[in-house]
Image (cartoon, rainbow, N blue to C red):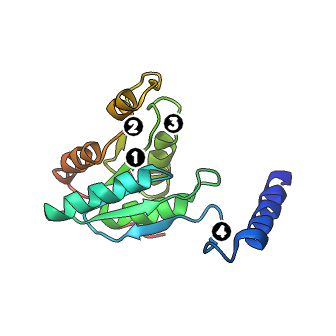
Amino acid sequence: MATEAAAVADLAEFERFYAQMLPVRRIGEAVVRRPGGDVTIVSALACVETSLAAAQELAEEGIEAEVLDLRSLRPLDSEAIAESAGRAGRPVVVEEAPPMGGSAAEVVAAAVELAWPVPARPVTMPDVPIPFGPVLEDAVIPSSRDVVDAVSSLVGEPARASYAP
């Protein structure tokens, strides 16, 4: 458990130096950034902003999307993923990485393993190297439109029963 002790020490140092500037939450605790009941959008880092933009677009179409900000991938808050996905029964996982070897597959697995078989959609970049240059990067990094399209494909499928831990 040396890694856990190091993480606790790092968090203590962070709190000591930066607590006045930022509200501190525990590493490994996901946060619901936007409540909703029709679908869950799970994301981390820069994809949270993309997910919030997509949730706003979806709200205009009458689809209420909950946005879960993972805040960290290790440790992964699997319980929060299962609870959030369980409320709607339809998780969409957004990640700025290729589908192979990315965290999106782990998040989908957490939802399935801890809850039940749910229809889930990963939204990732294509399985290509990340290109150089802003125009090319924008062409492969998932957009809010990509998220909206994935959610729209899921909304047509029946939701699963609620999660009960």
Sooner in the amino-acid sequence: mark 2 or mark 1: 1
Mark 2 or 4 closer to N-term?
4
**Mark pair 1, 4: CA separation:** 22 Å
Closer to the N terminus: mark 3 or mark 4?
4
Label 1: few (<14), some (14–19) or many (≥20) C-alpha neighbours in 10 Å:
many
Please tell me which residue lies in front, 115 or 1: 1
In percent of width and height, residue 135 lies at: 35, 30
Q: Which residue is mark 4?
A: 26
Q: CA distance from mark 2 to mark 1?
A: 6 Å
Q: CA distance from mark 2 to mark 3?
A: 9 Å
Where in the figure is residue 18, as x and y percent of width and height? 71, 70
Residue position for label 3: 102
Task: Give the mark nearer the N terminus: 1 vs 4.
Answer: 4
Q: Position of residue 152 (x, y in %)?
A: 19, 49
Q: Quadrant of residue 40?
A: bottom left
* Amino acid on which disc 3 is placed: Gly
Which sits in the foreground, 132 or 41? 132
Which quadrant is home to the N terminus?
Answer: bottom right
Residue at image coords 64%, 54%: 75
Residue farthest to the left, as pictured = 61
Q: Secondary structure at mark 1?
A: strand
Mark 1 and mark 3: span between their CA atoms?
A: 10 Å
Q: Which mark is residue 94?
A: 1
Three-letter amino acid code at the position of disc 1: Val
Q: Which residue is mark 2?
A: 124
Q: Is residue 82 visible?
A: yes
